Amino acid sequence: MYKLKSSVIAFFGFVLIGVTVAVVPHTGFGQVSEGNGAIQLNCDEQPCDAVARGRAAFNDRNLNDLGGNGRACADCHMPSEGFQLSPAAARARFDALQAKREHNKNADDPLFRPVDADDFRINGDNAIDFSNLVENGLIRITMPLPLNVKLIDPATGQPTDETSVDLWRAVMPVPNVAITGPDGALPIWPPGAPRPPIMGQDPNGPNRQGGYQHDARFGTLQEQARGALFAHAQVSVEPPAGMLDDLAAFQQTLFSSPGVELLSDAILSGSTPFPDPDPELNELEQQGKVVFNRACAQCHGGMLHPSGSTPETTFVRPLVRYHNIQTACPRPATDGYLPCPERLARNARTYRITLANGTFQFVTTSDPGRLLLTGQPADLGVMDVTQLRGISNTAPYFHNNSAATLEEVLDHYDAFFRRVARLNPAPNLPPLLSSNGLVVDRGFVTADERAALLAYLRKL
Ligand code: HEC
Ligand code: HEC
């Protein structure tokens, strides 16, 4: 249990004077510089004054007097951490705050606000148990339930009156958001036959061609920032549109490497062929790239899906932007998946889904993914494909930080590919495993290929 010692967290009306969020330069992020917490401006693509205002807003714990809880974007998207939050950083900040509280009961770190405490629903503003934040680096995301979905009370086994559910999700890295949003690629979600709507809901959900967040529920960076200001910074006033535009302008100048910036320019201007964002690769990394193009690029790269683009990818990909790769907890007990540790497994809830024919389906999961946007059981656990550029700076991985290292990521995919092959044998092998449905010529990374693939992933 990670409980904060003083339960007095008086942050409303808190005035922070001259606060700058600690911004430490991070190798690999060319835009970060020292001095007064500033991230160096990159005005190549966007008007410089908008980028400068956006940078200030991103770091502003006072948020132009919008009545927030003292948090800045940079409190979670820590520039020193590749603009995300690792469990190690959350724990270090928690320990530092505990130590300061020994001397000063008003010591504060706005990362630790009751809204992200495990016991918030029970203790409200007096909540102090930050286990999910400190052990897992996860943040509370509250999602409304679709009309056909109910939560089950674990004590009684009966549906509850809850109209929303709390999920726990990893802070996404902000660099490269210039290319992580909607991609305009066909086909739109879902592939294949139309789905019957359930209880009048949109069966496909928002942003059928990609969006922001793990479930792509926001279509623009402005919408995303507005959501973050209300949910995470708890502002009480509608944020001005200009501030949202400035935040977007600033974020669109953050890239994990110069190669990605060039790729982004080409995508925005439509000038093909797109440049290869990879840096110079040695022989092993070159081999790893071949493995990546065969085993991973069918979801993570390619001309029409620029996130983690690999322009050499020549095979026709399924071009599907959303997938369930079984990262939520609990995991299937088959195919070699590692069981989720209790610290993640405890975030699971049981859902009752009313199907189109009126019958019920029950599922227990820590994150139903896009099912919460559509009510469709086919969307259970379905997430947006994450971009992989700069990935070596942003461990741990997946929407619930469930893979600590890239090695663990590959172990997970090993089980995933095995499961897909078992459930869809030839002649119906899916495109992510096979180019003709008959032979496995994609997916699966052999033991001798692992070192090369890992070397390449670390260069992305
Ligand atoms: C309390 C922590 C926290 C704060 C504060 C916060 N975020 Fe986030 N951010 C997250 C989490 C968690 C996600 C993933 C949420 C999800 O998938 O539902 C996220 C996702 C994002 C994404 C999506 C990236 C992508 O590729 O899809 C962007 C952009 C972003 N945040 C920007 C911001 C901005 C701008 C602010 C300040 C206005 C902000 N965030 C404040 C935790 C935070
Ligand atoms: C079937 C499509 C698919 C294939 C094939 C695939 N991925 Fe993924 N990948 C996804 C999805 C969807 C996510 C987001 C899942 C989540 O967050 O829970 C993801 C997430 C990741 C992440 C986490 C990124 C982060 O920032 O947390 C890594 C790393 C990754 N994939 C690497 C790979 C590698 C390496 C391969 C090839 C061995 C591969 N993927 C093959 C769909 C795929």
Image (tube, grey):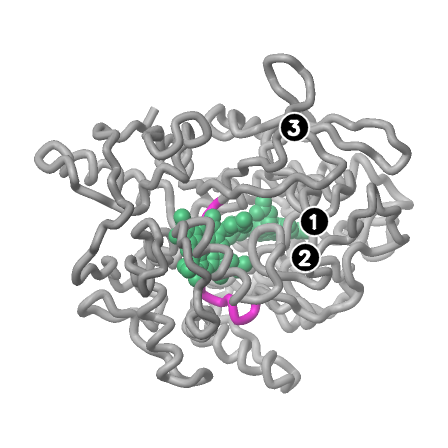
Marks counted in the figure total 3
Q: Main secondary structure of the magenta part?
A: loop
Dividing the image into 4 quarters, which one contains the N terminus? top left
Comparing marks 1 and 3, which lies closer to the viewer? 3
**Which circle's residue, 1 or 3, is located before the other in the chain?**
3
Q: Are marks 1 and 2 in contact (CB under 8 Å)?
A: yes
- CA–CA distance in space, label 2 to label 3: 32 Å
Q: Which structural element holds mark 2?
A: helix
- Between residues 203 and 390, which one lies in front from this camera angle? 203
176 magenta-colored: yes
Residue beneath label 3, please?
151
Can residue 417 be seen from the camera position used here? no
Can residue 304 be seen from the camera position used here? yes
Answer left or right for 120 relative to 333: left
- Can you tell which quarter of the image residue 151 is in? top right
Disc 3 marks a residue whose amino acid type is Leu
Q: Specify the label residue 323 is tagged with.
A: 1
